[in-house]
Protein backbone atom coordinates (compact mmCIF):
# COMPACT_ATOMS: atom_id res chain seq x y z
CA UNK A 1 0.00 0.00 0.00
CA UNK A 2 2.70 2.49 1.03
CA UNK A 3 4.68 2.09 -2.21
CA UNK A 4 1.99 3.88 -4.26
CA UNK A 5 2.58 6.96 -2.10
CA UNK A 6 6.38 6.65 -2.43
CA UNK A 7 6.39 6.21 -6.22
CA UNK A 8 5.55 9.86 -7.14
CA UNK A 9 8.57 10.97 -5.09
CA UNK A 10 11.15 8.54 -6.51
CA UNK A 11 13.69 11.30 -7.10
CA UNK A 12 13.54 12.44 -3.49
CA UNK A 13 13.67 8.83 -2.31
CA UNK A 14 16.79 8.13 -4.40
CA UNK A 15 18.55 11.20 -2.98
CA UNK A 16 17.71 9.99 0.51
CA UNK A 17 19.14 6.52 -0.21
CA UNK A 18 22.38 8.03 -1.57
CA UNK A 19 22.73 10.24 1.51
CA UNK A 20 22.14 7.24 3.76
CA UNK A 21 24.95 5.31 2.05
CA UNK A 22 27.28 8.33 2.19
CA UNK A 23 26.50 8.84 5.86
CA UNK A 24 27.20 5.17 6.60
CA UNK A 25 30.49 5.32 4.68
CA UNK A 26 31.69 8.35 6.62
CA UNK A 27 30.66 6.74 9.91
CA UNK A 28 32.74 3.61 9.17
CA UNK A 29 35.79 5.25 7.54
CA UNK A 30 36.40 7.67 10.43
CA UNK A 31 37.21 5.07 13.15
CA UNK A 32 39.40 3.12 10.69
CA UNK A 33 41.48 6.26 10.08
CA UNK A 34 41.77 6.71 13.82
CA UNK A 35 42.92 3.08 14.11
CA UNK A 36 45.66 3.73 11.52
CA UNK A 37 46.92 6.68 13.56
CA UNK A 38 46.95 4.53 16.70
CA UNK A 39 48.93 1.83 14.93
CA UNK A 40 51.68 4.36 14.19
CA UNK A 41 51.79 5.28 17.87
CA UNK A 42 51.70 1.64 18.90
CA UNK A 43 54.53 0.53 16.56
CA UNK A 44 57.03 3.26 17.51
CA UNK A 45 58.34 4.43 20.81
CA UNK A 46 58.39 8.04 19.62
CA UNK A 47 56.27 9.31 16.73
CA UNK A 48 56.50 12.78 15.29
CA UNK A 49 53.18 14.61 15.19
CA UNK A 50 53.68 15.19 11.47
CA UNK A 51 53.24 11.46 10.80
CA UNK A 52 49.86 11.15 12.45
CA UNK A 53 48.67 14.65 11.59
CA UNK A 54 47.37 13.65 8.08
CA UNK A 55 45.27 10.91 9.68
CA UNK A 56 43.88 13.29 12.26
CA UNK A 57 43.11 15.93 9.61
CA UNK A 58 41.44 13.30 7.44
CA UNK A 59 39.52 12.10 10.50
CA UNK A 60 38.35 15.66 11.20
CA UNK A 61 37.30 16.23 7.56
CA UNK A 62 35.42 12.94 7.52
CA UNK A 63 33.59 13.83 10.74
CA UNK A 64 32.63 17.30 9.42
CA UNK A 65 31.48 15.75 6.13
CA UNK A 66 29.51 13.17 8.08
CA UNK A 67 27.81 15.97 10.02
CA UNK A 68 26.82 17.76 6.80
CA UNK A 69 25.58 14.53 5.25
CA UNK A 70 23.44 13.86 8.35
CA UNK A 71 21.95 17.34 8.17
CA UNK A 72 21.10 16.83 4.49
CA UNK A 73 19.76 13.36 5.24
CA UNK A 74 17.50 14.73 7.98
CA UNK A 75 16.31 17.52 5.71
CA UNK A 76 15.39 15.16 2.87
CA UNK A 77 13.95 12.69 5.36
CA UNK A 78 11.60 15.32 6.82
CA UNK A 79 10.69 16.54 3.35
CA UNK A 80 10.09 13.03 2.03
CA UNK A 81 8.05 11.92 5.06
CA UNK A 82 5.99 15.12 4.94
CA UNK A 83 5.18 14.54 1.26
CA UNK A 84 4.16 10.96 1.93
CA UNK A 85 1.97 11.77 4.92
CA UNK A 86 0.33 14.66 3.05
CA UNK A 87 -0.48 12.27 0.21
CA UNK A 88 -1.86 9.71 2.63
CA UNK A 89 -3.93 12.34 4.44
CA UNK A 90 -5.42 13.64 1.16
CA UNK A 91 -6.12 10.11 -0.05
CA UNK A 92 -7.72 9.01 3.22
CA UNK A 93 -9.81 12.19 3.40
CA UNK A 94 -11.01 11.70 -0.19
CA UNK A 95 -11.81 8.05 0.44
CA UNK A 96 -13.72 8.87 3.62
CA UNK A 97 -15.86 11.35 1.69
CA UNK A 98 -16.61 8.67 -0.93
CA UNK A 99 -18.09 6.33 1.67
CA UNK A 100 -21.80 5.72 1.95
CA UNK A 101 -23.84 7.96 4.20
CA UNK A 102 -24.54 4.94 6.37
CA UNK A 103 -20.83 4.78 7.22
CA UNK A 104 -20.95 8.26 8.78
CA UNK A 105 -24.04 7.36 10.80
CA UNK A 106 -22.24 4.37 12.29
CA UNK A 107 -18.81 5.95 12.78
CA UNK A 108 -18.14 8.62 15.38
CA UNK A 109 -16.76 11.83 13.89
CA UNK A 110 -14.13 12.04 16.64
CA UNK A 111 -12.64 8.73 15.53
CA UNK A 112 -12.52 9.86 11.91
CA UNK A 113 -10.82 13.08 13.02
CA UNK A 114 -8.32 11.03 14.99
CA UNK A 115 -7.59 8.91 11.90
CA UNK A 116 -7.02 11.94 9.65
CA UNK A 117 -4.84 13.80 12.16
CA UNK A 118 -3.23 11.57 14.80
CA UNK A 119 -3.02 8.28 12.91
CA UNK A 120 -1.50 9.81 9.79
CA UNK A 121 0.93 11.81 11.95
CA UNK A 122 1.92 8.57 13.66
CA UNK A 123 2.77 7.18 10.22
CA UNK A 124 4.98 10.24 9.65
CA UNK A 125 6.84 9.55 12.89
CA UNK A 126 7.16 5.87 11.94
CA UNK A 127 8.56 6.83 8.53
CA UNK A 128 11.15 9.03 10.20
CA UNK A 129 12.11 6.20 12.54
CA UNK A 130 12.31 3.81 9.59
CA UNK A 131 14.87 6.00 7.78
CA UNK A 132 16.89 6.20 11.00
CA UNK A 133 16.79 2.45 11.53
CA UNK A 134 17.55 1.68 7.86
CA UNK A 135 20.66 3.88 8.08
CA UNK A 136 21.80 2.15 11.23
CA UNK A 137 21.10 -1.34 9.95
CA UNK A 138 23.24 -0.75 6.85
CA UNK A 139 25.96 0.55 9.15
CA UNK A 140 25.50 -2.52 11.35
CA UNK A 141 26.20 -5.01 8.55
CA UNK A 142 29.21 -3.03 7.33
CA UNK A 143 30.61 -2.85 10.87
CA UNK A 144 29.99 -6.57 11.43
CA UNK A 145 32.01 -7.29 8.29
CA UNK A 146 34.90 -5.14 9.56
CA UNK A 147 34.77 -6.65 13.05
CA UNK A 148 34.66 -10.18 11.65
CA UNK A 149 37.76 -9.42 9.56
CA UNK A 150 39.76 -8.45 12.66
CA UNK A 151 38.41 -11.03 15.12
CA UNK A 152 35.77 -13.70 14.71
CA UNK A 153 35.67 -14.42 18.47
CA UNK A 154 35.00 -10.82 19.45
CA UNK A 155 32.37 -10.56 16.73
CA UNK A 156 30.59 -13.67 18.04
CA UNK A 157 30.82 -12.26 21.57
CA UNK A 158 29.24 -9.01 20.42
CA UNK A 159 26.33 -11.00 18.95
CA UNK A 160 25.87 -13.00 22.14
CA UNK A 161 22.92 -11.09 23.59
CA UNK A 162 21.21 -10.26 20.32
CA UNK A 163 18.77 -13.24 20.36
CA UNK A 164 17.89 -12.56 24.01
CA UNK A 165 17.07 -8.91 23.23
CA UNK A 166 14.68 -9.87 20.45
CA UNK A 167 13.05 -12.58 22.54
CA UNK A 168 12.25 -9.95 25.18
CA UNK A 169 10.96 -7.59 22.47
CA UNK A 170 8.77 -10.36 21.06
CA UNK A 171 7.29 -11.02 24.50
CA UNK A 172 6.61 -7.30 24.95
CA UNK A 173 5.06 -6.93 21.51
CA UNK A 174 1.57 -8.18 22.31
CA UNK A 175 1.40 -6.09 25.45
CA UNK A 176 2.58 -3.00 23.58
CA UNK A 177 0.06 -3.48 20.80
CA UNK A 178 -2.78 -3.94 23.30
CA UNK A 179 -1.98 -0.82 25.33
CA UNK A 180 -1.37 1.23 22.16
CA UNK A 181 -4.78 0.23 20.81
CA UNK A 182 -6.38 1.15 24.14
CA UNK A 183 -4.58 4.52 24.21
CA UNK A 184 -5.63 5.37 20.65
CA UNK A 185 -9.24 4.42 21.36
CA UNK A 186 -9.30 6.62 24.49
CA UNK A 187 -7.72 9.47 22.54
CA UNK A 188 -10.44 9.23 19.88
CA UNK A 189 -13.14 9.22 22.57
CA UNK A 190 -11.67 12.41 24.07
CA UNK A 191 -11.82 14.04 20.61
CA UNK A 192 -15.39 12.86 20.15
CA UNK A 193 -16.46 14.14 23.57
CA UNK A 194 -14.87 17.53 22.96
CA UNK A 195 -16.50 17.84 19.54
CA UNK A 196 -19.89 16.87 20.95
CA UNK A 197 -19.53 19.35 23.82
CA UNK A 198 -18.82 22.18 21.37
CA UNK A 199 -21.74 21.24 19.13
CA UNK A 200 -24.19 21.17 22.03
CA UNK A 201 -22.82 24.11 24.00
CA UNK A 202 -26.16 25.93 23.98
CA UNK A 203 -28.00 22.94 25.43
CA UNK A 204 -25.16 22.46 27.90
CA UNK A 205 -25.53 26.00 29.24
CA UNK A 206 -29.33 25.94 29.16
CA UNK A 207 -29.46 22.86 31.38
CA UNK A 208 -26.45 23.82 33.54
CA UNK A 209 -24.43 20.83 32.37
CA UNK A 210 -21.01 22.55 32.37
CA UNK A 211 -19.76 20.81 35.52
CA UNK A 212 -21.08 17.45 34.36
CA UNK A 213 -19.30 17.85 31.00
CA UNK A 214 -16.11 18.95 32.78
CA UNK A 215 -16.31 15.90 35.06
CA UNK A 216 -16.88 13.65 32.07
CA UNK A 217 -13.87 15.13 30.27
CA UNK A 218 -11.79 14.75 33.45
CA UNK A 219 -12.71 11.05 33.64
CA UNK A 220 -11.89 10.49 29.98
CA UNK A 221 -8.61 12.39 30.32
CA UNK A 222 -7.69 10.31 33.37
CA UNK A 223 -8.39 7.12 31.46
CA UNK A 224 -6.32 8.39 28.53
CA UNK A 225 -3.55 9.33 30.96
CA UNK A 226 -3.45 5.82 32.43
CA UNK A 227 -3.37 4.17 29.02
CA UNK A 228 -0.74 6.68 27.87
CA UNK A 229 1.50 5.83 30.86
CA UNK A 230 1.18 2.10 30.11
CA UNK A 231 1.96 2.73 26.45
CA UNK A 232 4.92 4.94 27.33
CA UNK A 233 6.29 2.35 29.75
CA UNK A 234 5.95 -0.41 27.16
CA UNK A 235 7.90 1.66 24.62
CA UNK A 236 10.45 2.98 27.12
CA UNK A 237 11.35 -0.23 28.96
CA UNK A 238 13.00 -1.71 25.87
CA UNK A 239 15.74 0.96 26.06
CA UNK A 240 16.92 0.26 29.64
CA UNK A 241 16.87 -3.48 28.96
CA UNK A 242 19.10 -2.99 25.94
CA UNK A 243 21.37 -0.57 27.79
CA UNK A 244 21.84 -3.19 30.52
CA UNK A 245 22.86 -5.84 27.97
CA UNK A 246 25.11 -3.31 26.24
CA UNK A 247 27.08 -2.69 29.44
CA UNK A 248 27.36 -6.43 30.05
CA UNK A 249 28.54 -6.82 26.45
CA UNK A 250 31.26 -4.18 26.95
CA UNK A 251 32.62 -6.18 29.88
CA UNK A 252 32.54 -9.42 27.85
CA UNK A 253 34.39 -7.77 24.93
CA UNK A 254 37.04 -6.48 27.31
CA UNK A 255 37.53 -9.98 28.78
CA UNK A 256 37.47 -11.80 25.42
CA UNK A 257 39.58 -9.06 23.80
CA UNK A 258 42.25 -9.38 26.51
CA UNK A 259 42.38 -13.14 25.97
CA UNK A 260 42.57 -12.59 22.20
CA UNK A 261 45.41 -10.11 22.62
CA UNK A 262 47.34 -12.51 24.86
CA UNK A 263 46.86 -15.47 22.48
CA UNK A 264 47.41 -13.72 19.13
CA UNK A 265 50.50 -11.78 18.20
CA UNK A 266 48.73 -10.16 15.22
CA UNK A 267 45.84 -8.79 17.31
CA UNK A 268 46.93 -5.25 18.09
CA UNK A 269 45.81 -2.78 20.74
CA UNK A 270 44.52 -0.54 17.92
CA UNK A 271 42.27 -3.37 16.69
CA UNK A 272 41.11 -3.88 20.26
CA UNK A 273 40.39 -0.13 20.44
CA UNK A 274 38.47 -0.30 17.17
CA UNK A 275 36.13 -2.91 18.69
CA UNK A 276 35.40 -0.72 21.69
CA UNK A 277 35.09 2.35 19.49
CA UNK A 278 32.63 0.66 17.11
CA UNK A 279 30.61 -0.92 19.88
CA UNK A 280 28.18 2.00 20.05
CA UNK A 281 28.03 2.17 16.26
CA UNK A 282 27.21 -1.49 16.25
CA UNK A 283 24.78 -1.58 19.13
CA UNK A 284 22.77 1.57 18.32
CA UNK A 285 21.04 -0.03 15.32
CA UNK A 286 20.00 -3.00 17.44
CA UNK A 287 18.89 -0.67 20.21
CA UNK A 288 16.93 1.52 17.76
CA UNK A 289 15.26 -1.48 16.15
CA UNK A 290 14.27 -2.95 19.50
CA UNK A 291 12.96 0.39 20.76
CA UNK A 292 10.89 0.97 17.65
CA UNK A 293 9.41 -2.49 17.14
CA UNK A 294 6.36 -1.39 19.14
CA UNK A 295 6.06 1.74 17.00
CA UNK A 296 6.10 -0.39 13.86
CA UNK A 297 3.47 -2.65 15.40
CA UNK A 298 1.36 0.42 16.08
CA UNK A 299 1.92 1.61 12.50
CA UNK A 300 0.72 -1.72 11.12
CA UNK A 301 -2.42 -1.44 13.26
CA UNK A 302 -2.95 2.09 11.90
CA UNK A 303 -2.51 0.87 8.32
CA UNK A 304 -5.08 -1.86 8.96
CA UNK A 305 -7.50 0.76 10.25
CA UNK A 306 -6.86 3.07 7.28
CA UNK A 307 -7.28 0.18 4.82
CA UNK A 308 -10.71 -0.59 6.27
CA UNK A 309 -11.75 2.97 5.47
CA UNK A 310 -10.05 3.33 2.09
CA UNK A 311 -10.32 -0.12 0.51
CA UNK A 312 -13.46 -1.73 1.94
CA UNK A 313 -15.73 -1.70 -1.10
CA UNK A 314 -18.77 -2.55 1.03
CA UNK A 315 -18.81 1.00 2.45
CA UNK A 316 -18.18 2.82 -0.85
CA UNK A 317 -20.80 4.63 -2.85
CA UNK A 318 -21.34 2.68 -6.04
CA UNK A 319 -21.10 5.15 -8.88
CA UNK A 320 -22.10 3.30 -12.00
CA UNK A 321 -20.39 6.03 -14.10
CA UNK A 322 -23.28 5.51 -16.46
CA UNK A 323 -25.60 7.76 -18.40
CA UNK A 324 -25.07 11.53 -18.11
CA UNK A 325 -28.22 13.47 -18.94
CA UNK A 326 -27.87 17.03 -20.23
CA UNK A 327 -31.23 17.78 -18.63
CA UNK A 328 -34.12 16.03 -16.89
CA UNK A 329 -37.80 16.33 -17.70
CA UNK A 330 -38.51 15.58 -14.06
CA UNK A 331 -40.73 12.49 -14.28
CA UNK A 332 -40.19 10.50 -11.08
CA UNK A 333 -41.64 7.11 -10.25
CA UNK A 334 -41.18 4.91 -7.19
CA UNK A 335 -42.09 1.29 -8.03
CA UNK A 336 -42.49 -1.11 -5.11
CA UNK A 337 -39.56 0.40 -3.19
CA UNK A 338 -38.52 -1.23 0.07
CA UNK A 339 -35.52 -0.10 2.10
CA UNK A 340 -34.00 -0.88 5.50
CA UNK A 341 -31.07 0.61 7.40
CA UNK A 342 -30.80 -2.61 9.42
CA UNK A 343 -31.28 -5.93 7.55
CA UNK A 344 -34.76 -7.39 7.88
CA UNK A 345 -36.11 -4.22 9.52
CA UNK A 346 -37.58 -2.22 6.62
CA UNK A 347 -38.11 1.50 7.19
CA UNK A 348 -40.24 1.91 4.08
CA UNK A 349 -42.26 -0.90 2.52
CA UNK A 350 -43.49 -1.31 -1.04
CA UNK A 351 -43.70 2.44 -1.77
CA UNK A 352 -45.16 3.29 -5.19
CA UNK A 353 -46.13 6.69 -6.61
CA UNK A 354 -45.54 8.75 -9.74
CA UNK A 355 -44.67 12.42 -10.19
CA UNK A 356 -45.20 14.07 -13.58
CA UNK A 357 -42.76 16.76 -14.81
CA UNK A 358 -43.36 20.06 -12.99
CA UNK A 359 -45.62 18.55 -10.35
CA UNK A 360 -45.27 18.99 -6.60
CA UNK A 361 -45.80 16.14 -4.15
CA UNK A 362 -46.09 16.75 -0.41
CA UNK A 363 -45.05 13.95 1.93
CA UNK A 364 -46.78 14.13 5.29
CA UNK A 365 -46.71 11.85 8.30
CA UNK A 366 -45.63 11.58 11.89
CA UNK A 367 -41.95 11.73 12.86
CA UNK A 368 -40.20 8.46 11.99
CA UNK A 369 -42.74 7.44 9.38
CA UNK A 370 -40.08 7.29 6.60
CA UNK A 371 -40.56 10.62 4.77
CA UNK A 372 -36.89 11.71 4.89
CA UNK A 373 -35.79 8.23 3.83
CA UNK A 374 -37.90 8.48 0.67
CA UNK A 375 -36.25 11.82 -0.18
CA UNK A 376 -32.78 10.41 0.55
CA UNK A 377 -33.33 7.46 -1.79
CA UNK A 378 -33.99 9.77 -4.75
CA UNK A 379 -30.56 11.37 -4.21
CA UNK A 380 -29.02 7.89 -3.85
CA UNK A 381 -27.70 8.58 -0.38
CA UNK A 382 -28.83 4.97 0.00
CA UNK A 383 -29.79 2.33 -2.56
CA UNK A 384 -33.09 0.49 -2.41
CA UNK A 385 -33.35 -3.09 -1.17
CA UNK A 386 -36.09 -4.06 -3.61
CA UNK A 387 -38.08 -2.22 -6.26
CA UNK A 388 -36.72 0.66 -8.33
CA UNK A 389 -36.81 4.42 -8.66
CA UNK A 390 -37.19 5.76 -12.19
CA UNK A 391 -36.16 9.21 -13.37
CA UNK A 392 -37.42 10.07 -16.86
CA UNK A 393 -38.09 6.33 -17.31
CA UNK A 394 -34.53 5.24 -16.38
CA UNK A 395 -33.47 3.58 -13.14
CA UNK A 396 -31.56 6.18 -11.12
CA UNK A 397 -28.76 3.63 -10.59
CA UNK A 398 -28.02 3.80 -14.33
CA UNK A 399 -27.20 7.53 -14.10
CA UNK A 400 -23.78 8.91 -13.32
CA UNK A 401 -23.99 9.74 -9.59
CA UNK A 402 -22.37 13.15 -9.91
CA UNK A 403 -24.66 14.05 -12.81
CA UNK A 404 -27.73 12.89 -10.88
CA UNK A 405 -27.00 15.00 -7.81
CA UNK A 406 -26.12 18.11 -9.81
CA UNK A 407 -29.62 18.07 -11.30
CA UNK A 408 -31.41 17.63 -7.98
CA UNK A 409 -31.49 20.50 -5.49
CA UNK A 410 -31.61 19.54 -1.82
CA UNK A 411 -33.05 21.77 0.89
CA UNK A 412 -32.47 20.33 4.37
CA UNK A 413 -34.73 21.00 7.33
CA UNK A 414 -31.62 21.81 9.36
CA UNK A 415 -29.71 24.32 7.26
CA UNK A 416 -25.98 23.62 7.19
CA UNK A 417 -23.65 26.52 6.41
CA UNK A 418 -19.90 26.18 6.03
CA UNK A 419 -17.35 28.43 7.72
CA UNK A 420 -16.48 31.21 5.32
CA UNK A 421 -18.24 34.19 3.81
CA UNK A 422 -21.87 34.48 2.71
CA UNK A 423 -20.51 34.38 -0.84
CA UNK A 424 -18.66 31.11 -0.16
CA UNK A 425 -21.90 29.54 1.03
CA UNK A 426 -23.95 30.82 -1.89
CA UNK A 427 -21.61 29.58 -4.64
CA UNK A 428 -21.05 26.20 -3.00
CA UNK A 429 -22.85 24.35 -5.81
CA UNK A 430 -21.93 26.82 -8.57
CA UNK A 431 -18.39 28.19 -8.13
CA UNK A 432 -18.65 30.10 -11.44
CA UNK A 433 -21.64 32.21 -10.34
CA UNK A 434 -21.09 35.95 -10.83
CA UNK A 435 -22.16 38.67 -8.41
CA UNK A 436 -25.04 39.42 -10.77
CA UNK A 437 -26.18 35.78 -10.57
CA UNK A 438 -25.89 35.89 -6.78
CA UNK A 439 -27.99 39.05 -6.41
CA UNK A 440 -30.62 37.71 -8.81
CA UNK A 441 -30.94 34.57 -6.67
CA UNK A 442 -31.09 36.66 -3.48
CA UNK A 443 -33.78 38.89 -5.05
CA UNK A 444 -35.78 35.81 -6.02
CA UNK A 445 -35.86 34.51 -2.44
CA UNK A 446 -36.32 38.02 -0.96
CA UNK A 447 -33.00 37.93 0.86
CA UNK A 448 -31.37 41.03 -0.68
CA UNK A 449 -32.38 43.31 2.19
CA UNK A 450 -30.58 41.45 4.97
CA UNK A 451 -27.60 40.46 2.80
CA UNK A 452 -27.04 44.09 1.79
CA UNK A 453 -27.02 45.05 5.46
CA UNK A 454 -24.15 42.67 6.28
CA UNK A 455 -22.47 42.22 2.86
CA UNK A 456 -21.53 39.18 0.80
CA UNK A 457 -18.15 39.02 2.55
CA UNK A 458 -19.70 38.65 6.00
CA UNK A 459 -17.94 35.79 7.81
CA UNK A 460 -20.31 33.00 8.76
CA UNK A 461 -19.42 31.35 12.07
CA UNK A 462 -19.39 27.64 12.72
CA UNK A 463 -22.68 26.21 11.43
CA UNK A 464 -24.03 29.73 10.80
CA UNK A 465 -24.68 30.47 14.46
CA UNK A 466 -24.28 34.22 13.92
CA UNK A 467 -27.31 34.23 11.57
CA UNK A 468 -30.94 33.74 12.54
CA UNK A 469 -32.86 30.61 11.55
CA UNK A 470 -34.81 32.52 8.91
CA UNK A 471 -31.65 34.09 7.46
CA UNK A 472 -29.96 30.71 7.21
CA UNK A 473 -33.04 29.31 5.48
CA UNK A 474 -33.08 32.05 2.84
CA UNK A 475 -29.32 31.68 2.20
CA UNK A 476 -29.87 27.95 1.64
CA UNK A 477 -32.73 28.67 -0.81
CA UNK A 478 -30.57 31.12 -2.77
CA UNK A 479 -27.72 28.58 -2.77
CA UNK A 480 -29.96 25.91 -4.31
CA UNK A 481 -31.42 28.39 -6.78
CA UNK A 482 -27.92 29.28 -8.05
CA UNK A 483 -27.38 25.64 -9.06
CA UNK A 484 -30.54 25.87 -11.20
CA UNK A 485 -31.72 22.32 -10.42
CA UNK A 486 -34.48 20.69 -12.44
CA UNK A 487 -35.80 18.71 -9.47
CA UNK A 488 -36.15 19.84 -5.85
CA UNK A 489 -36.13 17.65 -2.75
CA UNK A 490 -37.04 19.79 0.24
CA UNK A 491 -37.51 19.10 3.93
CA UNK A 492 -39.30 22.19 5.25
CA UNK A 493 -37.89 23.74 8.38
CA UNK A 494 -40.02 23.58 11.51
CA UNK A 495 -38.10 26.24 13.45
CA UNK A 496 -40.32 28.89 14.99
CA UNK A 497 -39.81 32.28 13.30
CA UNK A 498 -41.79 35.52 13.36
CA UNK A 499 -44.76 35.90 10.99
CA UNK A 500 -42.90 38.34 8.70
CA UNK A 501 -39.97 35.94 8.23
CA UNK A 502 -42.39 33.02 7.94
CA UNK A 503 -44.14 34.85 5.11
CA UNK A 504 -40.86 35.55 3.31
CA UNK A 505 -39.71 31.93 3.69
CA UNK A 506 -43.00 30.68 2.27
CA UNK A 507 -42.71 33.05 -0.69
CA UNK A 508 -39.11 31.90 -1.24
CA UNK A 509 -40.30 28.28 -1.14
CA UNK A 510 -42.91 28.99 -3.82
CA UNK A 511 -40.29 30.67 -6.04
CA UNK A 512 -37.84 27.80 -5.57
CA UNK A 513 -40.40 25.11 -6.40
CA UNK A 514 -42.12 26.95 -9.25
CA UNK A 515 -41.97 25.05 -12.55
CA UNK A 516 -39.84 22.26 -11.06
CA UNK A 517 -40.68 18.70 -10.15
CA UNK A 518 -40.48 18.59 -6.40
CA UNK A 519 -40.88 16.25 -3.44
CA UNK A 520 -41.48 18.23 -0.26
CA UNK A 521 -41.58 16.88 3.27
CA UNK A 522 -44.25 19.35 4.24
CA UNK A 523 -44.72 20.98 7.64
CA UNK A 524 -46.66 24.05 6.47
CA UNK A 525 -50.29 23.97 5.39
CA UNK A 526 -49.67 26.45 2.57
CA UNK A 527 -47.14 24.08 0.99
CA UNK A 528 -49.61 21.22 1.30
CA UNK A 529 -52.43 23.27 -0.23
CA UNK A 530 -50.29 24.17 -3.24
CA UNK A 531 -49.18 20.58 -3.87
CA UNK A 532 -50.57 18.58 -6.76
CA UNK A 533 -50.68 15.48 -4.63
CA UNK A 534 -50.38 14.68 -0.93
CA UNK A 535 -48.93 11.33 0.10
CA UNK A 536 -49.54 10.26 3.68
CA UNK A 537 -46.88 7.96 5.14
CA UNK A 538 -47.44 5.84 8.22
CA UNK A 539 -44.98 3.24 9.54
CA UNK A 540 -43.11 3.26 6.22
CA UNK A 541 -46.17 2.66 4.04
CA UNK A 542 -48.40 4.88 1.92
CA UNK A 543 -51.79 4.89 3.59
CA UNK A 544 -53.45 7.76 1.68
CA UNK A 545 -52.95 9.75 -1.55
CA UNK A 546 -54.86 12.69 -2.96
CA UNK A 547 -55.36 16.46 -2.73
CA UNK A 548 -56.11 18.41 0.43
CA UNK A 549 -59.79 18.73 -0.43
CA UNK A 550 -60.09 14.99 -1.09
CA UNK A 551 -58.22 13.78 1.99
CA UNK A 552 -59.64 16.30 4.49
CA UNK A 553 -63.14 14.91 3.83
CA UNK A 554 -62.15 11.30 4.46
CA UNK A 555 -61.75 9.97 7.99
CA UNK A 556 -58.17 8.79 8.30
CA UNK A 557 -54.59 9.77 9.19
CA UNK A 558 -54.57 12.96 7.11
CA UNK A 559 -57.78 14.33 8.62
CA UNK A 560 -56.37 13.54 12.07
CA UNK A 561 -53.08 15.36 11.37
CA UNK A 562 -54.96 18.28 9.83
CA UNK A 563 -57.04 18.71 12.94
CA UNK A 564 -54.08 18.23 15.32
CA UNK A 565 -51.35 20.22 13.55
CA UNK A 566 -52.20 22.17 10.46
CA UNK A 567 -55.46 23.76 11.55
CA UNK A 568 -53.75 25.41 14.53
CA UNK A 569 -50.82 26.89 12.60
CA UNK A 570 -49.99 30.59 12.32
CA UNK A 571 -52.40 33.37 11.48
CA UNK A 572 -51.15 33.46 7.91
CA UNK A 573 -52.15 29.82 7.43
CA UNK A 574 -55.60 30.44 8.84
CA UNK A 575 -56.01 33.39 6.49
CA UNK A 576 -55.01 31.21 3.54
CA UNK A 577 -57.62 28.62 4.55
CA UNK A 578 -60.36 31.24 4.72
CA UNK A 579 -59.54 32.66 1.31
CA UNK A 580 -59.00 29.31 -0.43
Image: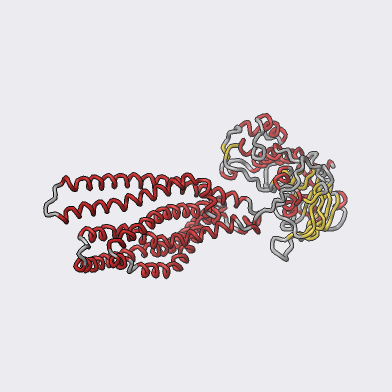
Q: Residue at x 67, y 37 (%)?
A: 430
Residue 425 percent coordinates (x, y): 62, 39
The residue lying toward the viewer, choosing from 195 and 300, is 300
**Is residue 333 shown to the viewer in this render?**
yes
The chosen color scheme is secondary structure
The residue lying toward the viewer, choosing from 508 and 565, is 508
Residue 567 percent coordinates (x, y): 78, 50
Residue 501 percent coordinates (x, y): 69, 39
In the depicted structure, whether residue 440 falls above or below residue 84: above
Q: Residue at x 70, y 40 (%)?
A: 480
The answer to which quarter of the image holds residue 266 is bottom left
Q: Quadrant of the N terminus?
A: bottom right
In the depicted structure, whether residue 454 falls above or below residue 367: above
Name the side, left or right, on which 564 lies relative to 46. Answer: right
Name the side, left or right, on which 393 lies relative to 227. Answer: right
Q: How many marks?
A: 0
Q: Residue at x 67, y 43 (%)?
A: 497
**Is residue 208 shown to the viewer in this render?**
no
Residue 241 percent coordinates (x, y): 33, 66
The residue lying toward the viewer, choosing from 58 and 195, is 58
Name the side, left or right, on which 550 lies relative to 249. Answer: right
Residue located farthest toward the left when viewing the structure as drawn? 46
The residue lying toward the viewer, choosing from 37 and 528, is 37
Q: Residue at x 60, y 51 (%)?
A: 95
Residue located farthest toward the top when viewing the structure as drawn? 436
Q: Quadrant of the C terminus?
A: top right
Amino acid sequence: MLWRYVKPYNSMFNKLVILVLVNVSFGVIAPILFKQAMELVEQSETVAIRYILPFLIAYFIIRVSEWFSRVLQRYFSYQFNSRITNSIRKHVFGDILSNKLDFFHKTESGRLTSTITNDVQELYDTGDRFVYIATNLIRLFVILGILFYFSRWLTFASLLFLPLVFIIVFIMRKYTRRVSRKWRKNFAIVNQNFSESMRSIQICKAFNQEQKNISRMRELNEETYRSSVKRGFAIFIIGPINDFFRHILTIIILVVGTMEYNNRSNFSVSAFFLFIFLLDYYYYPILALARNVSSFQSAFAILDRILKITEDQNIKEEDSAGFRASSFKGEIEFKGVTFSYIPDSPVIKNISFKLQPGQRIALVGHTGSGKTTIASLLLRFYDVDTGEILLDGKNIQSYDLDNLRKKIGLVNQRVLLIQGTIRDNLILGNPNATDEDIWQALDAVQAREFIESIGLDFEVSDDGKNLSAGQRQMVSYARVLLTNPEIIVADEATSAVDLYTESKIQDATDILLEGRSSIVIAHRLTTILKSDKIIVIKDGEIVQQGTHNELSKIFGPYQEMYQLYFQTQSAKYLEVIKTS
